[in-house]
Image: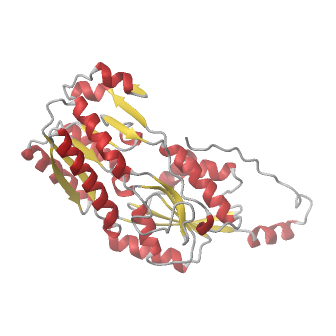
Amino acid sequence: MIERRTFMALVSGGLLAAPLAAEAQKSEKMARVGILGIGPVPSPQELAQSVSTNQFWLSMRQLGWVDGQNMVVERRFGESADQLRAGAADLVRLKVDVLFVRDAGLAKILQLETKTMPIVVGSAQGDLVAGGLVTSLARPGGNITGSQILNDDLAPKRLELLKALVPTLSKAAVLQEDVTLSVVPQMRARYDQRAAVAARTLGVELHMFIVHRSEEFAAAFRDMTKNRDRGVLVGSSAFMFVHRRAIVDLAAAHRIPAIYEVQNFVEPGGLMSYGVDIAEMERRAAVYVDRILKGAKPADLPIEQPTKFELVIDLKTAKALGLTIPQSLLLRADEVIE
């Protein structure tokens, strides 16, 4: 179970100080946080909505960090590996106090630019040690810390759940990307290996689909249909997360049952997910960023790893696909959306 903690921000002193002195103090203590994200640069409205609803930013505020008051946030975005690399280099040149990213691929892109600037990864989609990003979970040893999800270990479970939903499943697909995962090939290789072993055990022929840009999702699903794939395991890297609505819509249009790694894919109409609570991981990431801003070193902050996973099923999507959810599967579900 992921540890939850409550923090109290203590505000003291300075209230009676002269305005100019207060402004000088504020300027001296202004922290700088760098964010590297997937996609086009968001509009001011999109950014405001994200800050007001995202658990990372809500938790940062609870911890006493407010953009424009005692913190400046520098954001860079990209839709290709080259754009992300350029954004990472830009953030490093700005000499921010800490960098925050959602997954291991983005963390590695940043680490290629700096071996000293602290990096917090919110939910790495694989083993950070095997991926070469940290030395060990207990003592990361470098400039990266945060949380990881061993999706390679969970791949067999997800395939088993897909098989339980579609008992006649004989061919299935795995949908991944290489915009961010290309820099952590060990992670993708481990995932592919575990998925392949599980598929052989379950008597399922597995087909791998790797997209290089978002425009390739449609072609991937067309090829799944040609292959007669009756199910698909969908990855949840930052790139896939940003394009989750398009992926969910394509799965529905091609009538291919899909299992996702996080509930956020089920919310826009995805069929089923088995994985962690991303909101909780965002809260934990804020705690790590807070600790680093207060002087902690990433090398000394252990990598966290969740142990609780939830199965979520959308009955409306199942009905649209002509699927009847077995009672045994419904009983195993942590949440059933009707």
Image quadrant containing the N terminus: top right
Among all residues in the image, which is located at the extreme left? Answer: 226
Q: Residue at horizontal 36%, vertical 72%?
A: 83
Among all residues in the image, which is located at the extreme right? Answer: 16
Instruction: Choose between 25 and 236: the one closer to the eye.
Output: 236
Q: Quadrant of residue 205?
A: top left
Q: Residue at horizontal 61%, vertical 44%?
A: 3
Image quadrant containing the C terminus: top left
Residue 269 visible in rendering: no
Among all residues in the image, which is located at the extreme top? Answer: 327
All told, the count of numbered labels is: 0
Q: Residue at horizontal 27%, vertical 37%?
A: 160
User: Taking 147 as reference, is 252 above or below it?
Assistant: above
x and y percentages locating residue 158 in the rendered image: 30, 40
User: Taking 51 as reference, is 293 above or below it?
Assistant: below
In this image, 337 relative to 289: left or right? left
Among all residues in the image, which is located at the extreme bottom? Answer: 93
x and y percentages locating residue 333 in the rendered image: 39, 27
Residue 263 visible in rendering: yes
x and y percentages locating residue 176 in the rendered image: 27, 55
User: Taking 24 as reference, is 336 above or below it?
Assistant: above
Instruction: Choose between 172 and 257: the one closer to the eye.
Output: 172
In this image, 41 relative to 225: left or right? right
The colour scheme is secondary structure
x and y percentages locating residue 19 in the rendered image: 86, 66
